[in-house]
Amino acid sequence: MHILRCKTGPLDLELHVEDFDILSFIEHTLPVGSVKAAPEATIRIHEKANCPQIHERASYDPTAIVYDLKNVTYVYYPHDSIYRVSVGNRARGLIDFKNSSAVWNMRRSIPAPRSAFHILVLDPLSLLLPSHGLQILHGAAVVSRQGATLLLGRSGSGKSSLGLLASHLNPDDEIRFLSDDTLFLDFTSDIVQVHPVHTGFGITSELLARLNIRDHNILQYGQGKAYLSHVPSQSQGPHKISRIIFLEKESAGPPSTKVTRLSREKTLLNLLDSQTTIGSPFLLERFNLLKRLTRQAPGISLRYAKYCNLDVLRTIVTED
C-alpha cells in the first residue's frame, strides 16, 4: 500500500493506493508531496479485495436514493450520510460524509486509468469538498492579465479545443491555458480562485496535426481523442476568476458566433445546468458557493454554429 499526501489548493488530501496505474496517474495529476497537517479528506483504494453487492440493500431502506451515471451506481443513505457506490463488478465504494473519506475495494482494475482516476478520486471529492469551501467543476480555464476565464458547457461544446486554440495560436494576446476537464474552485478566501488539475488534456487528431504535437506528449487515446501528458506553456495557479463563458455549439445553420451577457440569476442557472450533480448533505453549500461565484464573475453565453470566431473569444477573455 502506497500513501500519497497531496495539497490541492488549500486541501490536504491523503490517498492510500495499491493499483499501480492509478498511482501513476495520481502522481502525474496532483501535486504529490509532504503535507504536515492532518488530512482533511482521505481516499483509500484497495486492489483485489472483496467487493460485496450493494444493490439489494437499497430495497431494504425506503429512504435510499439510487443514481445511475455512466455505468456507475450511487446509492445514497440520508440517515447514515453515506454513499455506497458500484462500478459494475469491478469496484465497490463507500463515501462517508461525516468523516470526509472514501474507501474503495477493487476486484479488477477499471480499464482506463483516466476513467478510474475520475471515478475513484475526483467523483468522491466533488461530493465531499463543498463542506471544506471547495468545488470541483467540469470545464476548462484560460488565464489573461484580467484573471481566469472558465469555459463551461456540455460535452462536445468545444471547451478544450477552443481554450487551447485561443491560448496557442496568438501568443501576443498573453492568453495561457490553465486547466482542462477538471477545475478546483477555492472559496476559502474573499476572492474565489481556480486551481489547475492536470487530468490529461484531450484534443482531436485534427488539432494534434495543426499544433504539431509529438507522440511522446500523448498520455493515452480514448473516446476519439488523444490525451496529452501536459499542455505546452500551461499556466500555474491559483488565479482569481474574472468571468465565466458558457459555450453552446449548434449543429445546424450558417457559420455564426453570438455573444450574450447574462444576469446573475441566469449565470447561476447555467452553472447548475452545466454540471452533473447528485444528492449529498452538502447540496446547499454547493449552491451557495456557486451563487457567490456569480457575484464575482459575470456570465457570458457564447453560442456558435460550424465554428467559433476565435477573435470574439479572445476579446471576451482579455477585455477589462
Image: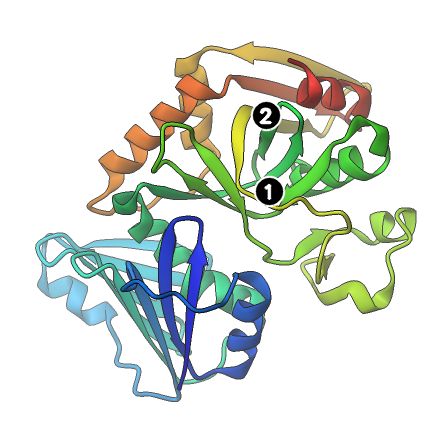
**Residue under circle 1?**
155
Marks counted in the figure total 2
Whether 36 is drawn above or below 173: the answer is below
Residue 167 lies left or right of residue 121; in this view the side is right
Circle 1 Cα neighbour tier, 10 Å, few/some/many (<14 / 14–19 / ≥20): some
Residue 71 seen in render: no
- Viewer-proximal residue among 156 and 34: 34
- Residue bearing mark 2: 245
Task: Please tell me which of labels 1 and 2 falls first in the chain.
Answer: 1
* Callout 1: SS: loop
Describe residue 173's horizontal placement relative to residue 163 as left or right: right
Callout 2: helix, strand or loop?
Answer: strand
Q: Position of residue 109 (x, y in %)?
A: 49, 81
Q: Name which residue lies at 68% across and 15% down.
A: 319
Residue 165 - label: none
Residue at image position (42%, 43%) is 276
**For this rendering, which residue is in front, 109 or 97?**
97
Residue 93 appears left or right of 247: left
Amino acid type assigned to the residue bearing label 2 in the image: Ile
Q: Tell me the colour scheme of the image.
A: rainbow
As displayed, is residue 151 above or below residue 221? above
The answer to whether 18 is drawn above or below residue 211 in the figure is below
How far apart, in angstroms, are the residues tagged by discs 1 and 2?
15 Å
Residue occupying image coordinates x 67% and y 26%:
145
Examine the image and state in which quarter residue 54 appears. bottom left
How dense is the environment of label 2, judged by Cα within 10 Å: few (below 14), some, or many (20 and up)? many
Name the amino acid type tagged 1: Ser
Q: Nearer the viewer, mark 1 or mark 2?
A: 2
Q: For the C terminus, give its image quadrant.
A: top right
